[in-house]
Image: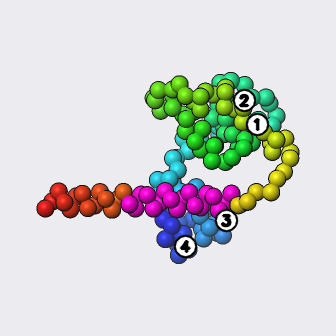
Amino acid sequence: MSIEQAQAGSGTAEAGADPGDEAMPRVSELLRAEGLMEPDESGDDAAVGDLTRQPLAFPAARDLRLQNLARGDEGVLLALVDRAFRARELGEETGAPAQDEEFVPSHSDNVQATGFVEHLKLPHHVDFQAALGLVRRMRREIAGREGSDDREAAE
């Protein structure tokens, strides 16, 4: 389902789904449709670890690494460090401290994760929306450049 279909309220409802779900697509579906989120290949029946019930052990599975990073200082770190952790999985060379599966989670727990709450300047959705807007703008610029390169080559 495209963003335009979602905004227009059209699309297909899954069998057995709540009729109200048709007009309200999942954000993850919209992001996957734009190529901004990779497909979930783990399957629905995969067991998800729970960091609050068991201590972090190394090497840690991705679900536990993400839970640990979410408890860390900044949500932005989650995406950056998760990508760095996946270097081996993606066949890339490793060696930077951000790629060390023991170093980063061991040093990311902070005061806020222990229950101390502080006032945050912006809600997380504002930061996410700004980052999403930046990615979309960069994609349009690249597509525009590629289009002009194609036109120049044809001339």
Frontmost residue, 2 versus 70: 70
Residue at the spot of label 4: 7
User: Residue 106 — which label?
Assistant: 2
Frontmost residue, 154 versus 44: 154
Q: How far apart are marks 3 and 1 (CA)?
A: 39 Å
Q: How far apart are marks 3 and 4 (CA)?
A: 18 Å
In the structure shown, which secondary structural element does the residue marked by tag 4 occupy? helix
- The answer to whether residue 71 is magenta is no
Can see residue 42?
no
Can see residue 4?
yes
Indicate the amino acid at tag 1: Asp
Residue at the spot of label 1: 109
Q: Distance between the residues labelled 3 and 2?
A: 42 Å
Range drawn in magenta: 123-141
Name the magenta segment's main secondary structure.
helix
Residue at the spot of label 3: 18
Indicate the amino acid at tag 4: Gln
